């Protein structure tokens, strides 16, 4: 019996070796990559300083809103520039597991159904490991407390330490930094204030969907109405829009995302509202009022003048914070002075082809605004421009830096991080691809949209029909051409036909190429073959 048991154990061990997962491919020649997320893109844990317990407060499902309000609600301290939790015992930390990647991968690792809605850099991390990057050797993450200012010294010191640690772990190789959204402002601020450290450790900086000149429509409605981290049915399991609103009013990072006043916008972002007014004769009339960037601050102040939050039974005032605005304006001045060191290359990927909030309007002629304090309960309507749904392309392109390349990619603000088009570009810039003929500046992606095949017999003949459709997505190379020339060249689809016939067989095909619109071109292939049934 003992011999039989030993043989069984040996057989099981052999079987386990046979099914053991193969070791992932590792390319030792790759330079290290550091991923830096944007606002709300890092897991945050709360440490109880009394008993040392630690729990995740962003993001989570069970008890999410309660933990968010008790542990993350905070107030800004103008003497330090730091946002401090209302709970004096709670200390917010970012988990450092997996060399910093744990905090920026899936923001709720416990979520089973619908986990994709809380993925952040997850798909990119998976893709990078396929290319040969290795966690802890050539792949790292930098999570941070996104409530804080992008120039908080504590955060900048942590980033400096991270860069040195990555540089040493990679054997003295310089680093490729990839930022998303507000992470671009954080790195730009660091580059300005710590140029020597940046130049010492960084080889390339790739910014994705960065709001370099702000996100005007999105931030305006955030101040007045809050924001949802996820869309769709999943948002019912997360933080309420009201709870998020009360947090963001005291976050310097949000004020630093306001539209830049000194940027030459193609169309000035506006805060508009339909208001009921009395004219000189005392008659009521409804008019549309428009407020440019500087004047909209007064609307924020009046709308939030009576805003309060109840914490532990005490009503705390949370108006629009002018001290934070003063701090944020100084941050924007610092960022505007940033220059890329000569030894570093900067690349910019920005989202296009989505309706993106630019100006915001409240009320209408039937339901005008009568009390600015009620603006929080109005549904905003947006005037949109091209962008990624959150950041206008105009803002993301205007980095003010000497860029090696700027590429517009169709994609949604957070979803762009899992776009295969973006992966293809990154693979080239990170030199994880050795295709000498690939050029991201004129890159295109072919997406299959339909495929149908049908076979049937008719009077002794076998008939096969095929229909395929694709979309070719590329940059609109004609955007600077004369409009009349574009219309003349592309007003009709191009159609090509091919016919083949032989004894007992016949085939024909038609290819239709539709006009390009907003960087997309639709291609259809319809084919038919007929053969005699022997």
Image (cartoon, rainbow, N blue to C red):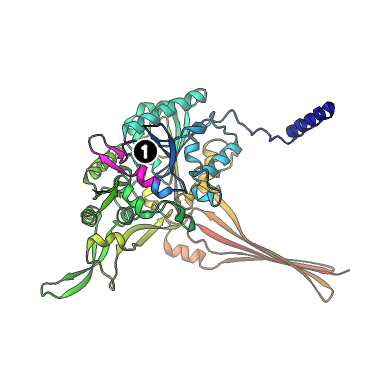
Is any atom of residue 397 visible in this view? Answer: no
Q: Could one spot residue 343 in this view of the protein?
A: yes
Mark 1: secondary structure? helix
Above or below for 232 versus 401: below
What is the x, y in percent for residue 372?
Answer: 23, 61
Return the x and y of residue 443 as percentages of the image width and height: 54, 48
**Residue at point 35%, 51% (across, down):** 243
Q: Quadrant of the C terminus?
A: bottom right
Q: Position of residue 290 (x, y in %)?
A: 24, 62
Depth order, front residue of 431/391:
391
- Reply yes or no: does residue 79 show up in magenta: yes
Name the residue beneath numbered marker 1: 186
Q: Residue shown at 66%/32% (left/top)?
A: 23
Image quarter (top left, top right, bottom left or bottom right) of the N terminus = top right
The magenta stretch is 67-88
Image quadrant in which you'd find residue 382 = bottom left
Tell me which residue sits at (37%, 51%) in the image. Answer: 394
Q: Quadrant of residue 17?
A: top right
Q: Nearer the viewer, residue 410 or 11?
A: 11
- Measured as percent of width and height from the top left, residue 273 is found at 26, 64
Q: Residue furthest left?
A: 281
Residue 66 painted magenta: no
Instruction: Give the vertical position of 363 relative to 244 (above or below).
Output: below
């Amino acid at each position: 019996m003992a011999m039989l048991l030993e043989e069984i154990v040996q057989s099981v061990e052999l079987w386990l070796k046979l099914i053991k997962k193969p070791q992932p491919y590792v390319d030792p020649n790759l330079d290290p990559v550091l991923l830096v997320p944007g606002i709300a893109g890092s897991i945050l844990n709360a440490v109880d300083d009394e008993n040392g317990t630690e729990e995740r407060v962003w993001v989570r499902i069970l008890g999410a809103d309660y933990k968010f309000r008790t542990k993350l609600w905070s107030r800004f301290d103008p003497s330090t520039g730091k946002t401090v939790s209302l709970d004096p015992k709670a200390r917010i930390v970012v988990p450092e597991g997996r060399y910093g990647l744990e905090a920026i991968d899936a923001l709720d690792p416990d979520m089973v159904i619908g986990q994709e809605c809380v993925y952040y850099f997850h798909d990119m991390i998976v893709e990078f490991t396929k290319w040969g990057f290795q966690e802890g050797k050539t792949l790292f993450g930098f999570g941070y407390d996104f409530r804080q200012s992008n120039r908080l010294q504590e955060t900048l010191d942590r980033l400096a330490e991270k860069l040195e640690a990555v540089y040493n772990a990679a054997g003295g190789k310089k680093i490729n930094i990839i930022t998303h959204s507000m992470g671009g402002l954080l790195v730009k601020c660091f580059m300005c204030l710590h140029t020597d450290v940046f130049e010492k450790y960084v080889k390339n900086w790739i910014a994705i969907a960065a709001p370099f000149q702000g996100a005007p429509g999105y931030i305006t409605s955030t101040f007045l109405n809050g924001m949802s981290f996820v869309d769709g049915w999943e948002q019912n399991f997360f933080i309420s829009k009201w709870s998020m609103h009360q947090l963001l009013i005291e976050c310097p990072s949000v004020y630093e995302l306001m539209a830049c006043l000194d940027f030459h916008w193609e169309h000035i972002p506006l805060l508009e509202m339909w208001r009921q007014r009395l004219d000189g004769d005392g008659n009521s009339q409804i008019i549309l009022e428009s407020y440019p960037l500087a004047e909209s601050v007064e609307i924020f102040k009046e709308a939030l003048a009576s805003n309060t939050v109840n914490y532990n039974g005490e009503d705390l005032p949370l108006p629009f914070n002018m001290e934070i605005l003063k701090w944020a304006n100084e941050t924007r001045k610092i960022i505007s002075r940033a220059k890329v060191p000569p030894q570093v290359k900067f690349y910019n990927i920005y989202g296009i082809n989505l309706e993106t909030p630019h100006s915001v309007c409240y009320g209408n002629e039937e339901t005008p605004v009568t009390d600015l304090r009620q603006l929080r309960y109005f549904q905003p309507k947006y005037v949109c421009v091209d962008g990624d749904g959150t950041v206008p392309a105009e803002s993301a392109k205007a980095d003010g830096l000497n860029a090696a390349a700027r590429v517009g990619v169709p994609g949604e603000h957070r979803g762009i991080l899992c776009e295969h088009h973006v992966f293809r570009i990154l693979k080239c810039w990170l030199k994880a691809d050795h295709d000498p003929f690939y050029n991201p500046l004129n890159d295109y992606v072919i997406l299959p949209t339909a495929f149908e095949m049908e076979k049937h017999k008719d009077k002794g003949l076998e008939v096969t029909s095929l229909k395929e459709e694709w979309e070719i997505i590329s940059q609109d190379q004609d955007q600077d051409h004369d409009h009349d020339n574009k219309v003349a060249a592309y007003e009709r689809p191009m159609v090509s036909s091919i016919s083949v016939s032989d004894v007992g067989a016949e085939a024909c095909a038609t290819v239709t190429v539709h006009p390009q619109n907003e960087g997309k071109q639709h291609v259809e292939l319809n084919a038919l073959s007929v053969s005699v049934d022997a």
